[in-house]
Image (cartoon, helix red, strand yellow):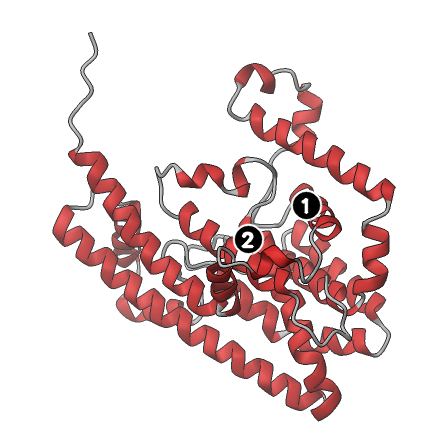
């Protein structure tokens, strides 16, 4: 996505990461109209793919200089320092969300809040000490707080793979990443407190992060391939088919047109394990975006885009703030729905 020799910041990274964080915020508020304008309703991938891929791009651009200047161990120590900061932010927001859930239950009751009922059930099944340890070990996560643990895992292992790419062995980093991804499709996963796989399996999602790193390191050559006529046609065709497939989920008549054999092959389209259909859909979008949006397009510098760029540049703060605000928004939407007068039919 970006030339690794470029000295000018690629504005697309911050702006699109900002959009991804805003879309994640709206998608975490049930029952709002704005969420219908987010990517998840028009294709197989969504904002999470954008966020993880750009995290890989940003990591490579930020750490390749440190590797060249200070060496492997210094770069890894810096990365682990960032891991610790993200881990601490996750724990702080988790504690805040748990307190907010409990206060919501006290003020409004528990019937309409699955997050509260789930928290109470978990508290009944496990001792406070076990819950606290599970929170520290990332085995217990409050609602909508699955992305930061994923990022912690990916970032902790990213420096060795980036080192390989900088030594001209990007192909080896790619093969290692693909191998781990394939293992994830066959059961390799981290488990939570209930012995269920994580909502985002880091062994699967690391592939998208690594592909982001490789894109940052090999921007010019990949751009030539990605913007070829054949790739453009394939991208448009796959996006059109994906849109029809998503539409079929809302239109039973269209869904029934698909033969049973095709449906058995397609489903389930796993988000936890980053299904290959989601992955290819994201790259179809990325191909068109790279083709039509230059790195320094003037509209990226406009006043309208400036807030998104600021959010994207401070992605950790943007994500954690969005989680808290989306919880408050969900409470407001739930209480408004419960206080609305019943619709009279007759």
Mark 1 nearby-residue class (10 Å; few <14, some 14–19, many ≥20): some
What residue lies at 37% left-to-right and 63% top-to-bottom? 321
**Looking at the image, which residue sits at the far bottom?**
70
Q: Position of residue 72 (x, y in %)?
A: 71, 87
State which quarter of the image contains the N terminus: bottom right
Position of residue 208 in the picture relative to residue 227 (left or right): left
Judging depth in this view, the residue of 264 and 11 nearest the camera is 11
- Residue 35 in sight in this render: yes
Is residue 316 placed above or below 328 in the rendered structure?
A: below
Q: Nearer the viewer, mark 2 or mark 1?
A: 1
What residue lies at 72% left-to-right and 48% top-to-bottom? 292
Residue picked out by circle 2: 48
State which quarter of the image contains the C terminus: top left
Q: Are marks 2 and 1 in contact (CB under 8 Å)?
A: no
Q: Position of residue 193 (x, y in %)?
A: 41, 59
Is residue 45 placed above or below 344 in the rendered structure?
A: below
């Amino acid at each position: 996505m970006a030339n690794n020799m470029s000295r000018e910041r690629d504005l697309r990274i911050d702006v699109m990461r900002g959009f991804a964080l805003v879309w994640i915020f709206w998608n975490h508020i049930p029952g709002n109209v704005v969420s219908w304008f987010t990517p998840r309703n028009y294709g197989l991938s969504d904002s999470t793919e954008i966020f993880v891929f750009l995290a890989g791009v940003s990591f490579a651009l930020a750490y390749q200089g440190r590797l060249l200047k200070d060496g492997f161990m210094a770069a890894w120590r810096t990365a682990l320092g960032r891991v610790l900061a993200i881990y601490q932010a996750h724990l702080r927001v988790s504690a805040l969300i748990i307190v907010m859930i409990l206060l919501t239950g006290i003020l409004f009751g528990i019937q309409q809040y699955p997050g509260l009922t789930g928290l109470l059930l978990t508290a009944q099944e496990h001792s406070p000490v076990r819950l606290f340890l599970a929170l520290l070990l990332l085995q217990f996560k409050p609602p909508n707080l699955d992305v930061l643990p994923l990022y912690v895992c990916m970032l902790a292992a990213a420096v060795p793979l980036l080192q390989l790419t900088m030594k001209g062995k990007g192909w080896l980093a790619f093969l290692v990443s693909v191998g781990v991804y394939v293992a994830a499709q066959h059961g390799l996963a981290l488990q939570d407190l209930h012995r269920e796989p994580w909502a985002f399996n880091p062994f699967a999602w690391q592939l998208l992060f690594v592909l982001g790193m490789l894109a940052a390191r090999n921007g010019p050559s990949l751009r030539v391939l990605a913007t070829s006529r054949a790739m453009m046609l394939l991208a448009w065709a796959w996006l059109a088919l994906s849109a029809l497939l998503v539409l079929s989920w809302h239109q039973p008549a269209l869904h029934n047109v698909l033969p049973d054999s095709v449906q058995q092959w397609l489903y389930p389209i796993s988000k936890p394990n980053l299904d290959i259909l989601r992955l290819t859909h994201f790259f179809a979008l990325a191909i068109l975006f790279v083709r039509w949006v230059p790195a320094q397009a003037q509209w990226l510098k406009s006043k309208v885009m400036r807030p998104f760029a600021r959010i994207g540049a401070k992605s950790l703060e943007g994500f954690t703030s969005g989680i808290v605000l989306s919880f408050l928004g969900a409470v407001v939407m739930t209480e408004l729905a419960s206080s609305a007068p019943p619709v009279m039919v007759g």
